[in-house]
Image (cartoon, helix red, strand yellow):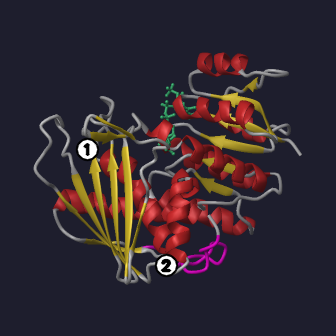
Amino acid sequence: MTVNVGVIGVGMIGQDHVRRLTTVLPGSAVVAVTDSDAERARSVAVSVPGGAAPRVFATGQELIADEAVHAVVVASWGPTHEEYVLACVAAGKPVFCEKPLATTQDACLRILDAEAAHGRRLVQVGFMRRFDPAYRALKETVDGGAIGAPLLFHSVHRNPSVPPHYTADMAISDTAVHDIDVARWLLDDEVAAATVLKPRRNSRAGALQDPLVVLLEMQGGAVVDVEVSVTIAYGYDIRGEVVGETGTAALAEGNTVVVKREGAFSGRVPPGWRERFLRAYDLEFEAWLAAAAQGSAAGPSAWDGYAATAVSDAALEALRTGTRQTVSMRERPGLYTPPGQGRATT
Ligand code: NAP
């Protein structure tokens, strides 16, 4: 079955997802696009290879309502996500929503309520690390018991630089939010409290407080430390190591070749997130399309989107106040897999 997809927001990542859906993955066709920049929507539509160009809609709401659209990708600006995800749920259409699910916890809760009222999952949130082959191997190792019960997770998120619009809060809400999600997923646990440390600043950081160390205390007692460095120059470097009772498991370096010459050895550090997570984006869409073809959703859920926003809010408050902040969350609805029962899934 071909899933006819409508894409809302065809900026940087939206265009990449259109490319993925039309030239990388089988089983889908992009039949509709919209963007607040109508000219951008038109130029993306005419650039889509293959048969008929996607229809260009004036608004996301009209795109969602169109009968030819089976499933929707929301890749517009974060504050617009709630409106479109709620419209998709109301229309009973599977929706892939780029992170964040929504920018406030109240908005996330409205989506949870709508999906619960619908009775089955329709929403997948774009936490692509869960599909990255290296993170999957790490999770399989931890879940398989090879290192004993996990006690600590060290996570490192390094960016060479960030664009001018990047604000101080984005180090947590935009960058560390991926580590927050992956910590919950790897450890099958929720975050109980957050503290943020401010090390000596990188002289390249301008007005930003960079680096940051985000400490997360999990409900089950494990502790997570996340280093966020966004002006570190040398490359995009993602690391993760779980310390268990009897061993450790870490993401391997991604190089397929290591060069040794003149008394030294070297490998490549990717320049950015696109290259590092290229395969993960493809795999997350493969899973989304398979579920959407069945009228449902897989992978990171609306609950995961809500939890990420709740923890990110607590960490932002910890950053502002310099104090430890507890994370309070609503009880998990039955629709969403509880921690400890999701080990074999994404
Ligand atoms: P972007 O380049 O600014 O693209 C967003 C596009 O959406 C722009 O063309 C924008 O138009 C359009 N837009 C804004 N409001 C809209 C609305 N109400 N209806 C229709 N279109 C609208 O941003 P981006 O970097 O692609 O990011 C988009 C989303 O993806 C964000 O939520 C971001 O956090 C997420 N993202 C996730 C990852 C990941 O690793 N998972 C990576 C990158 C981005 P204007 O330019 O006219 O405003």
Horizontal arrangement in the rendering, residue 148 relative to residue 48 (left or right): left
Along the line of sight, the residue nearer the viewer: 181 or 255: 255
The residue carrying mark 2 is 146
As drawn, the label of residue 337 is none
As shown in the figure, which amino acid type bears the numbered disc 1?
Answer: Ala
Q: Earlier in the sequence, mark 1 or mark 2?
A: 2
Q: In this view, does 294 lie above or below 20?
A: below
Along the line of sight, the residue nearer the viewer: 87 or 179: 179
Q: Which residue is drawn at 17% across and 37% down?
A: 207
As shown in the figure, which amino acid type bears the numbered disc 2?
Answer: Ala
Magenta residues, start to end: 329-344
Q: Does the residue labelled 1 lie within 8 Å of ligand 1?
A: no
Horizontal arrangement in the rendering, residue 27 relative to residue 298 (left or right): right
Q: In this view, does 32 lie above or below 159?
A: above
Cα distance between the residues tagged 1 and 2: 39 Å
Q: Residue at x 89, y 46 (%)?
A: 1
Q: Identify the element where label 1 is drawn.
A: loop
Q: In this view, does 72 lie above or below 133?
A: above
As drawn, the label of residue 168 is 1
Along the line of sight, the residue nearer the viewer: 31 or 134: 134
Q: Identify the element where label 2 is drawn.
A: loop
Residue 22's image quarter?
top right
Q: Main secondary structure of the magenta part?
A: loop
Residue situated furthest front in the rendering: 262
> Looking at the picture, how far across and down is residue 313, in whole percent?
35, 60
